[in-house]
Amino acid sequence: MDVLLIGGLWLDGSVWDDVASALRSLGHNPVPLILPGQGDGSASATLDDQVAAVLAAVDSASGRPMVVGHSAACTLAWLAADARPEKISKTVLIGGFPAADGKPYADFFELRDGVMPFPGWTPFEGPDSVDLDEEARRAFAATAIPVPEGVATGVVRLTDERRFDVPVVVVCPEFTPAQAKEWINAGESAELAKAAHLDFVDIDSGHWPMHTKPTELARLLAAVADTA
């Protein structure tokens, strides 16, 4: 199965290198996406540009791909399910929930000179980064790609309720499945509360399992794909 992999903020497709290698050995075809504004010098890229790139990957995939979004990019995966509900076999959300219609994509941190740079590790102290050593943190910060303002502040538009019929799996890294269910039941994700087929899978890692547990993450994704 084609498995489209979308990294979260400050990342590009290379973050999936180890996961992709393991997925190939497990019989799947990983497709790490590099989106507009991710290292191509295009600080003018918008959320619409990134959505269009994801949809192009869906349209060119073999069969019905599984779309995997990490962190903020859970919303990109969800937007793909909204735009192509008949073409996607499953949506996998790693370490995040999709934003609702009318909400900004990811206006979480300070914007400077038209981009949202990596804010440093202070906002991620605790479970998010507990499994990243100092060397890994330095490497992450050194390669972090500033997010274009037009992406970070882009407004999410959802139009097709058939998205709720696309099976969803929430991968829980720095939080547990029990916590995720509690948050959804408490109203923190109106979108996932309406999902007709919603499952949860735990992985013992911080917020970036593609860095710290790539083999385990690949096995998990392969198992999800095998049941699609």
Image: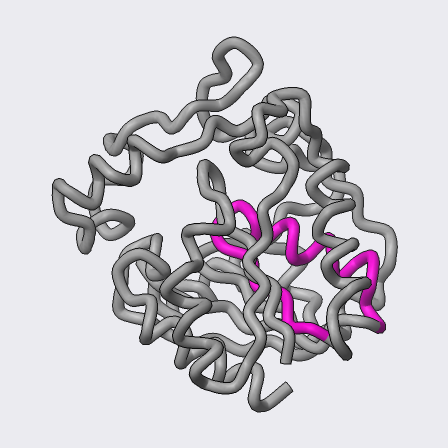
Quadrant of the snapshot with the C terminus: bottom right
Residue depicted at 19% across the width and 50% down the height: 132
Quadrant of the snapshot with the N terminus: bottom right
Magenta residues, start to end: 65-86
Is 136 positioned to the left or the right of 192 in the image?
A: left
Residue depicted at 48% across the width and 78% down the height: 24
Residue 66 is inside the magenta segment: yes
Classify 104 as above or below 217: above
Is 203 positioned to the left or the right of 90 in the image?
A: left
Classify 171 as above or below 76: below
Is 122 positioned to the left or the right of 183 in the image?
A: left
Outermost residue toward the bottom in this view: 227
Q: Quadrant of residue 47?
A: top right
Is 62 or 74 nearer to us in this picture? Answer: 62
Q: How did the renderer colour the structure?
A: one colour
Determine if residue 187 is in view.
Answer: no
User: Residue 128: x percent and y percent?
Assistant: 28, 49
Determine if residue 94 is in view.
Answer: yes
Residue depicted at 35% across the width and 34% down the height: 143
